[in-house]
Image (spheres, rainbow, N blue to C red):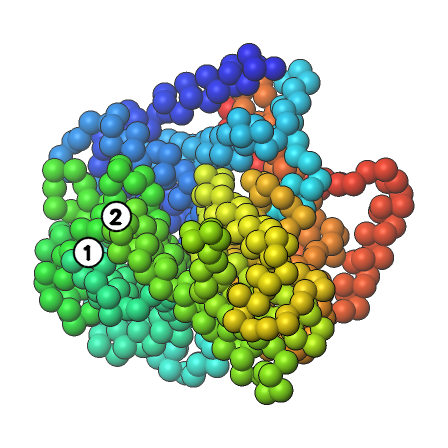
């Protein structure tokens, strides 16, 4: 078995390191990588694809770029010139490279590496390579994905409503004005002027669509600029990207925009342009842009989306790296790596603020003094700190105790990040167990925690509260509940908070999902060389009205009865890697 997987690894690595793209110049390889990435994203928009689908295509494309860009910078030779003209052979070479690199990334991170981590079990039958997981792991990870995707879809629905509610005539007038300024300079290139009215209109669109939700104080300095400075500069880059994206829509005469991607700016000209839009100083703009320029140190183009061509001052911009991503997430992932101490101190402040907010909600409804609430409290034993309580609530009448441990981190993208998030959630579970052990040692310890007398405990409800994922494969004790913060607050505001048992049951119910009602198990199938690889996946279904949910559930019961003894059923979803 080990020999077979090593053979597969060698073939994958040999293929990725000997792609035809590395025969191109550094400049051509980078330009065509960005062209292909942008075409994949914008053509989905042209055909009316959903924003979620475009985001998925962008994420897949980014995985391919993250694999290829470091290798391009290492293997390719510079020609000393940038040529944006189309070239069918170079385009096809690059398209094939990014397709393979995308699947290479998936096979490694979502297959081989998870076998190395003992998350998947490997079953090789002839040339069929099947990656299998336990039903418990699959359902635990799927629950986390459903909550995240449902929250994203609600945000998309809000954006659609805001955009639809705009004045249609005003939008048409602005677009027509932009079209009138477009001039063809060759068969494949064009240029256009941007009026102040166009700029102001698209600034409004950006304000509506990209509602920033910074958890940090935006006035603090992270490195040589404030968070507010960084936000304004990212908005300026989105503005440049979205105007060019719309110009591409209308630049052709046959209904399909001409190719004029990626955008190329001499660095000083880009600084000047962003300074005009953001109203910030040259120094601040330069400092932020320097942080956003791609480096092989971090190898992540989403949070360093500007490409500086080596040994030049030419900066390349591909619009969908800005249009299809979140500035908060990208900046914070960058700052977590680059400005570690400042970032960590801000995380502590955010976490403390969340704890105070939860405590306040409980205290505000505690008119009859039935509840006692504490937050951010150290627990000492024999004069030493053993752990701390984020939030604890006890009902003096029912003697029900709720312990809440808050964990704050960015939503993880890769299995490596998921493992890091699970490690933090495991720590939260361990902290709750320590508190429970402390309470079991001495009946008076509950009085010490709440600084009260004659308190008793009939039942303890333990909650690990996560701002994002609710846990995946690496959660050590899956019997402990991990809940999403947004859902927690929503239920908290709708349920009888005095009744801890009722609140907990309602919260647990909202985190329980059913196959064929909320999600469909799936298989991603990759063909490479003589191998066919089967990787587990999932399709998240839309939330819907109760009758449709009922019909879905009836279908689920029928299928379960028909396939008695089976616990997970796979719906095939083909993704073919070119040989």
Task: Give the answer, above or below, for where 375 lies relative to 439.
Answer: below
Which sits in the foreground, 242 or 161? Answer: 161
Image point (36%, 21%), residue name: 18
Q: Position of residue 194 (x, y in %)?
A: 22, 70
Q: Describe residue 28's horizontal placement relative to residue 314 as left or right.
A: right
Q: Quadrant of residue 238?
A: bottom left
Q: Quadrant of residue 21?
A: top left
- Circles 1 and 2 in contact, beta carbons < 8 Å: yes
Which sits in the foreground, 530 or 247? Answer: 530
| On-image quarter of the N terminus | top right
Q: Describe residue 407's horizontal placement relative to residue 140 as left or right.
A: left
Q: Describe residue 161's horizontal placement relative to residue 254 as left or right.
A: right
The residue tagged with tag 1: helix, strand or loop?
A: loop
Task: Give the answer, above or below, for where 233 lies relative to 129.
Answer: below
Residue annotated with mark 1:
223
Task: Give the answer, above or below, for where 394 lies relative to 49.
Answer: below
Give the mark nearest the N terminus, 1 or 2.
1
Task: Give the answer, above or below, for where 445 lies relative to 140.
Answer: below
Image point (30%, 29%), residue name: 71
Residue annotated with mark 2:
338
Image point (69%, 36%), residue name: 134
């Amino acid at each position: 078995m080990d020999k077979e997987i090593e053979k597969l690894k060698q073939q994958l690595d040999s293929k990725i390191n000997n792609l035809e793209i590395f025969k191109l110049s550094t400049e051509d390889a980078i330009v065509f990588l960005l062209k292909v990435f942008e075409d994949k994203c914008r053509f989905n928009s042209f055909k009316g694809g959903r924003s979620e689908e475009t985001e998925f295509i962008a994420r897949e494309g980014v995985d391919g770029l993250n694999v290829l860009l470091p290798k391009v910078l290492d293997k390719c030779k510079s020609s000393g010139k940038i040529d944006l003209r189309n070239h069918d052979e170079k385009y096809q070479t690059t398209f094939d490279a990014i397709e393979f690199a995308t699947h290479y990334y998936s096979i490694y991170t979502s297959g081989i590496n998870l076998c190395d981590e003992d998350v998947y079990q490997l079953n090789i039958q002839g040339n069929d390579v099947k990656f299998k997981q336990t039903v418990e792991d699959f359902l635990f990870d799927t629950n986390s994905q459903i909550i995240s995707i449902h929250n994203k879809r609600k945000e998309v629905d809000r954006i659609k409503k805001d955009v639809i509610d705009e004045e249609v005539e005003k939008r048409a007038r602005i677009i027509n004005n932009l079209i009138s300024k477009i001039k063809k300079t060759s068969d494949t290139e064009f240029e256009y002027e941007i009026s102040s009215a166009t700029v102001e209109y698209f600034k409004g669109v950006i304000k509506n669509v990209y509602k920033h939700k910074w958890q940090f104080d935006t006035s603090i300095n992270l490195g040589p600029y404030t968070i507010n400075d960084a936000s304004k500069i990212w908005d300026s880059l989105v503005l440049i990207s979205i105007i060019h994206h719309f110009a591409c829509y209308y630049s052709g005469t046959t209904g399909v925009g001409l190719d004029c991607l990626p955008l190329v700016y001499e660095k000083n000209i880009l600084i000047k342009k962003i300074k005009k839009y953001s109203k910030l100083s040259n120094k601040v703009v330069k400092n932020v842009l320097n942080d956003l320029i791609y480096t092989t140190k971090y190898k992540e183009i989403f949070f360093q989306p500007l490409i500086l061509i080596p040994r030049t001052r030419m900066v390349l911009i591909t619009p969908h790296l800005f249009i299809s991503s979140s500035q908060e997430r990208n900046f914070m992932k960058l700052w977590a790596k680059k400005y570690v101490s400042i970032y960590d101190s801000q995380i502590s402040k955010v976490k403390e603020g969340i704890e105070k907010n939860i405590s306040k909600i409980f205290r505000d409804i505690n008119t009859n003094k039935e509840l006692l609430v504490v937050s951010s409290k150290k627990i000492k034993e024999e004069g030493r700190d053993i752990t701390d309580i984020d939030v604890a609530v006890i009902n003096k009448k029912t003697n029900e105790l709720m312990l809440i441990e808050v964990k704050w981190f960015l939503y993880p993208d890769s299995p490596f990040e998921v493992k890091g998030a699970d490690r933090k959630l495991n720590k939260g579970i361990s902290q709750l167990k320590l508190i429970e052990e402390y309470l079991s040692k001495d009946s008076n310890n509950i009085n010490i925690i709440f600084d009260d007398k004659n308190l008793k405990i009939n039942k303890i409800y333990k909650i690990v509260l996560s701002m994002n994922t609710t846990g995946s494969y690496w959660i050590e004790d899956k019997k402990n509940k991990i809940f999403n913060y947004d859902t927690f607050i929503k239920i908290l505001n709708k349920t009888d908070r005095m009744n801890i048992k009722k609140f907990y049951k309602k919260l647990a119910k909202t985190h329980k999902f059913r196959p064929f009602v909320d999600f469909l198990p799936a298989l991603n199938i990759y063909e490479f060389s003589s191998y066919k690889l089967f990787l587990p996946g999932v399709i998240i279904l839309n939330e819907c009205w109760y009758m449709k949910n009922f019909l879905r559930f009836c279908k689920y019961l029928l299928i379960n009865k028909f396939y008695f003894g089976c616990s997970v059923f796979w719906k095939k979803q083909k993704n073919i890697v070119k040989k």
